[in-house]
Amino acid sequence: MTTLRLLCAVAVLVILNPANGAPADGADLYAQFCQGCHNNNAAGLQQFTGSIEEFQGILEGERDTTMPDFYGVFGPEEVAELYRYIRSPEPG
Amino acid sequence: MRSLIRQYLDEGLSRRGFIRELGALGVSLASAQTLLASLSDAQADTLSDAGLDESIARIVTGNGSDMIFETFEQAGVKYIFHGCGGGTNRFFDSVLQRPGLKNFLATNEGQAVAMAEGYHIASGGELGVAMIPRPGLMNAGGNIHNAMVNRSSMIVLTAREHNKFSNRRGNIELVEWEDVLDPFMKWGYKMQNFGRVPEFTRRAIKVARTPPGGPVFLQMTENLYQETGEGTILPQNRFHVAGGVRAKPELIEQAARMLIEAENPMLVVGLEVTKSGGQAELIELAELLAIPVMQGLSAFADFPSRHELALGWFTRFSVYMRKSDLMLLIGSQMPDEGHYVLTGPPAENTKICHISLEPEMLAMAWPTDLSIMADARAAIVDLTEAVKSMLTKRRITAIRAARHPVVTEYIQADRARKLKRAKRFWDRTPITYPRLSTELNDLLDDDAIIVSESLFDVAPWFDVGHGRKLQIGPQPGEVLGWATGVALGAKLAQPDRQVVALSGDGAFMFQNALWSLSRYDAPVLIVIYNNKAYNMNWAFNRTGGGAQARAKKDLATYLGNPDVDYVMWAKSHGIDGEGVTDPGKLRAAIKRGIGVVRDGRPYLLDVHAERWGGVGDYTWHPEISIAGMRTRKV
Ligand SMILES: Cc1ncc(C[n+]2csc(CCOP(=O)(O)OP(=O)(O)O)c2C)c(N)n1
Ligand SMILES: [Mg+2]
């Protein structure tokens, strides 16, 4: 029940946000949300070889790390884009 | 040249002396005389006490130091926190003769400043006074900086050598150190003229107290100890500058309209809310329209951490930072990326309305839709009234009813998820930060004062804010070596409230207040989150990749060798304590600590805590032995 309500809460926020129509771009998202800690070109994530489910779990704070909790911040497409990006970051 | 002119104006230098010193600087006699002529006009403008209303003036006799302390006393100062030496010792002659004053010795000047700041904050705004010998000014510098960032009202009193010898030591020896610290000071003055000591002391107090507050230094030359005479002491309340500056009504109306029209507004609040006394009013504003509130950079819980609308500590990585269409900052700096890893501005199309008393904080680096210079409390009250006057009661109720469940359910679920995550590791040894913090929060009094430093992500586990526990720290100024000194000052200000000082092991080693805590019988519970590391630095170093991360070798952050026995350290100061390794025994240990504190003595808990951030396994450190580098046993 709580999960359902939470999904509603997140959904309401997502729906209300006018920017949400823009297509997700892994490099942009990475630069905005991850680069500060993991460096350019995902340098700090080279050793990560986990699956997309595991990746999603990390973003949602399921792992025992002090990485900030991105719960509800990204939609599924954005998660996929980020996952794609950290595995093959464009040089630059 | 500037200092020569000031000496001359303050009558610390004769006309002849002035011309001679200028000559030594290469200024011709004719130019020096022209300069003198223009300066006599300036002299005529200086305030003379002679014209003041006698009914409010009190004439006292004494030396320059007496004038300072007489002025302090009539301004309500009761406590002086200090180091020892460097020309300040004769100040104590004046303290001794004034039974209303008590002095507290710190064995490191940084702690004297921390004590003064703790006293200022916990007393609700009384002036802190730190008396710092000049060789100790640099030691004090870090905590002066912390006090400046917190806008804490404080006088830093120093003394320097007799005028006869000034500036003769060359530029590396204790010369003008106050000037070096100038960027961390709100104002400062070097007093050379006996007749003007009360005036400048008053002015220093006024500047330190006027919002936004800050440390102000006041220096006296030693020759003023030798001069005695009459001084005019005036009541400080005649030099009081009230805060509470209100914004133009049309700006408030504009802000109110932005707030009403936003679909997903959020508030980011900072220390000006607490400083202006606007915490209760902030709760009312947030509740009026069910606006979620993030705690911005601050040493305080400006919004209660457990309130149903509290989003918690600022992080740019939150749904709200991404989705809000209005960010209303009140009394907080814009949490710019420059601050630390979790800060950063909102999404591009979020509107920004920023209210602060400090114009330089407004529209600093991020395009801002509406900047309002005002006192936080006044602006909150005016904004609340504006919203109420612009909408019908029914409309307000409708906005609140639509938003409230969305916001509160999100927050509840977010908290539940974090707690669930923490509970997975609840019984782990070494003890986790969330477990230790939660147990402390449960066992401490509801109105306890919690001073803390470093300890990333610990604050959210405490129930702090208006009507709850009082949180002081972690210090946004970041300079470590603060909490135990602050705790002493806080206990002095609030002897009838429980006070705890929380620090990481790294932070604790920067502190140096055990001697004072013991000497002055300060019943403070000291808790060390001892993970034998500068954890923060390793955690956020490792995430960036690089040679150290790849090799899983960190050169600079492991503290477990030697494995410091903090209990023994405390005991050597006459402070009892115990180590805690077993999470099952944590509550009993905290209760024992609380008991000892109730009985009137400090107590130290050395809690063996986890290394967080996925770095728990790491103990590698470079093997270096200087003894091993010897070729003979000397
Ligand atoms: C005077 C000073 N020197 C260095 C730093 C940089 N610094 C920030 S956090 C930190 C480590 C703190 O370690 P600890 O108190 O043990 O907390 P932990 O990160 O282990 O939780 C250091 C060295 C600082 N803030 N202040
Ligand atoms: Mg540590």
Image: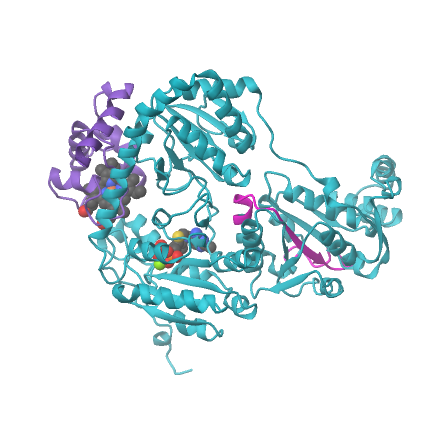
Tell me the residue at 56%/43% (across/down). Answer: B151
**Seen in the image, is B222 located left or right of residue B509?**
right
Residue stretch in magenta: B146-174
Query: Where does the C terminus of chain B fall, quadrant-wise?
Result: bottom left
In x, y percent, where is residue A14?
A: 24, 24
Quadrant hosting residue B500: bottom left
Q: Is residue B153 magenta?
A: yes
In x, y percent, where is residue B318?
A: 30, 34
- Above or below B266: residue B625: below
In x, y percent, where is residue B102?
A: 66, 62
User: Which of A84/B514 is in front?
Assistant: B514
**Seen in the image, is B42 located left or right of residue B413?**
right
- Above or below A72: residue B516: below
- Count of picture labels: 0
Res. B25 visible in picture: no
Query: Quadrant holding ligand 2?
Result: bottom left
**Seen in the image, is B59 located left or right of residue B464?**
right
Q: Which chain is cyan?
A: B
**Seen in the image, is B169 located left or right of residue B13?**
left
Quadrant hosting residue B158: bottom right
Q: Give the color scheme: rainbow, by chain, secondary structure or one colour.
A: by chain
User: Which of B81/B424 is in front?
Assistant: B424
In x, y percent, where is residue B189?
A: 71, 47
Q: Which chain is purple?
A: A
Tell me the residue at 70%/59% (across/down). Answer: B169
